Amino acid sequence: MATNLPVNFSVRLPTICLRCRATRAPLIHKADPARRITTSSARRAIAAAPIDFSSQDNLPPPNVQNARVVPASPSYFSGRPDFTDNLLNLQALLRRYQTLPTVPPGQAPRVAWRTVSQYRLLVGEPVRASKYHQVIEVLKRLNQIHPAIMPPDLQDAMQIYKRDINPYAVVKRPAIIDEHGRSCGIGRRKSSSAKVHLVQGEGEVLVNGKSLNHVFGRVHDRESAIWALKATNRIGKYNVWALVSGGGTTGQAEALTLGMAKALMVHEPDLKPALRRAGCITRDPRRVERKKPGKLKARKMPAWVKR
């Protein structure tokens, strides 16, 4: 028997996927209940009133308990915030002043920059040597700007990375000949030191008030002591009076060589190339290596025994 009542068909037939040939369940879309609320009174019941940001008077009072501390630098969340800020500031200064006139690299003022260990103590961060090298490269480029037109803010920024004492600014005191015609030279080798006084004479040499034969028993040490005079053919033209202390005979003899060469250059500065070729004015920094525990000497190991 047929009826005229309306029928609501909400069930759909299953569909077949063309790729996998599998039967899929029918999709029934249900309406979102939040979308059915259309009146303004209902919206005010479930949501807060809108805030007018156009004026400061309409803003709610700040909640101190829920306030968040904002860091002064965006590099705060990085592993090395101070180093990152320093590098970015130097790069910004380089972009600002890169068009200023510069001097050739050889004519730029010599500056002793802080070492990586000193910089780590300054910022208190474990900065790598390769990263600090980037800062040094930027500083060297900024140092090439002509000193006459270097901006004050740039000088203040570079002063942080300079050492407290600049070794390049130390001027060596020139050696002079006193009223008695004597020149003085100081030489060192290993733990020995020698102070040599040189004056024109007949070639007499006294070390601690004694002759060379009494002080140095080896012929090699005697020749090393007066090698500066022998290399320049000045043995019979100057008298030498020296004071040596510390170390052994070899160290004292080579300390005399350096001190005698320095004193000789005060009388005759033109002999410097000849003395340099003879190896008399170069300080030898080598020292005896200390003995290590478990070894017979500095590096010698005991004989290996299997049993």
Image: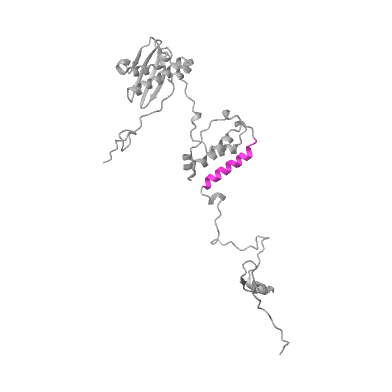
Q: As drawn, which residue projects farthest toward the left?
A: 307
Chain part drawn in magenta = 80-99
Query: Is 152 or 16 nearer to us in this picture?
Result: 16
Query: Is 29 or 100 nearer to us in this picture?
Result: 29
Give coordinates of residue 111: x percent, y percent: 53, 32
Query: Is 277 or 225 nearer to us in this picture?
Result: 277
Quadrant where the N terminus lies? bottom right
Q: Is residue 299 on the magenta stretch?
A: no
Please say if 205 is above or below 23.
above
Give coordinates of residue 64: x percent, y percent: 55, 61
Q: Is residue 106 left or right of residue 288?
A: right
Is residue 73 visible in the rendered structure shown here? Answer: no
Q: As drawn, which residue projects farthest toward the bottom?
A: 1
Q: Quadrant of residue 216?
A: top left
Q: Is residue 94 on the magenta stretch?
A: yes
Query: How many numbered dots are placed on residues in this image?
Result: 0
Give coordinates of residue 183: x percent, y percent: 42, 16
Q: Quadrant of residue 159?
A: top right
Q: Is residue 185 left or right of residue 143?
A: left
Please say if 209 is above or below 119.
above
* Residue found 63% across the figure and 40% down from its top: 95
Query: Is 24 or 281 nearer to us in this picture?
Result: 24
Q: Is residue 125 left or right of residue 104?
A: left
Is residue 90 visible in the rendered structure shown here? Answer: yes
Quadrant where the C terminus lies? top left
Magenta stretch secondary structure, dominant: helix
Give coordinates of residue 105: x percent, y percent: 58, 30
